[in-house]
């Protein structure tokens, strides 16, 4: 299955990350303009894996 296919479970994931990073950069720029010192932490390579229903989330007990 092609990740660019709209039916793929991860379609749009890159767009979401790009929006988060763009928002972070814009917010940091606004703070710098106001005299704040900022630090932007960019995520590394991320591979989101959709929940398939076969495993319980790690933070919940079964």
Image (cartoon, rainbow, N blue to C red):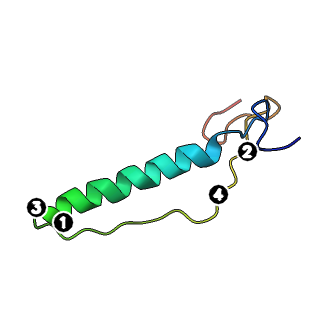
Q: Please tell me whether mark 1 or mark 2 is closer to you in this view.
A: 1
Find residue 36 and report its image quarter. Answer: bottom left
Q: Which residue is mark 1?
A: 32
Labelled pair 3, 1 in contact (Cβ < 8 Å): yes
In primary-sequence order, the first of circles 1 and 2 is: 1
Q: Secondary structure at mark 4?
A: loop
- Marks 3 and 1, how far apart at CA: 5 Å
- Marks 1 and 4, how far apart at CA: 28 Å
Report the side of 1 relative to 60 (left or right): right
Q: Secondary structure at mark 1?
A: helix
Residue at 64 percent of width and 63 percent of height: 45
Q: Return the mark for residue 60.
A: none
Q: Please tell me whether mark 1 or mark 4 is closer to you in this view.
A: 1
Labelled pair 2, 3 in contact (Cβ < 8 Å): no
Find residue 62 and report its image quarter. Answer: top right
Above-or-below relation of 23 to 32: above
Residue at 52 percent of width and 51 percent of height: 18
- Marks 1 and 2, how far apart at CA: 35 Å
Question: Residue 41 location in percent, x, y?
Answer: 42, 66
Residue at 27 percent of width and 60 percent of height: 28
Q: Which residue is mark 2?
A: 49
Q: Which residue is mark 4?
A: 46
- Marks 3 and 4, how far apart at CA: 32 Å
Report the side of 47 relative to 25 (left or right): right
Q: Nearer the viewer, residue 53 or 3?
A: 3
């Amino acid at each position: 299955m092609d990740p660019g296919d709209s039916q793929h479970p991860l379609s749009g994931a890159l767009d979401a990350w790009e929006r988060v990073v763009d928002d972070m950069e814009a917010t940091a720029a606004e703070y710098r303009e106001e005299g704040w010192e900022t630090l932007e932490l960019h995520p590394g390579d991320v591979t989101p894996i959709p929940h398939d229903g076969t495993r319980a989330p790690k933070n919940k007990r079964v």
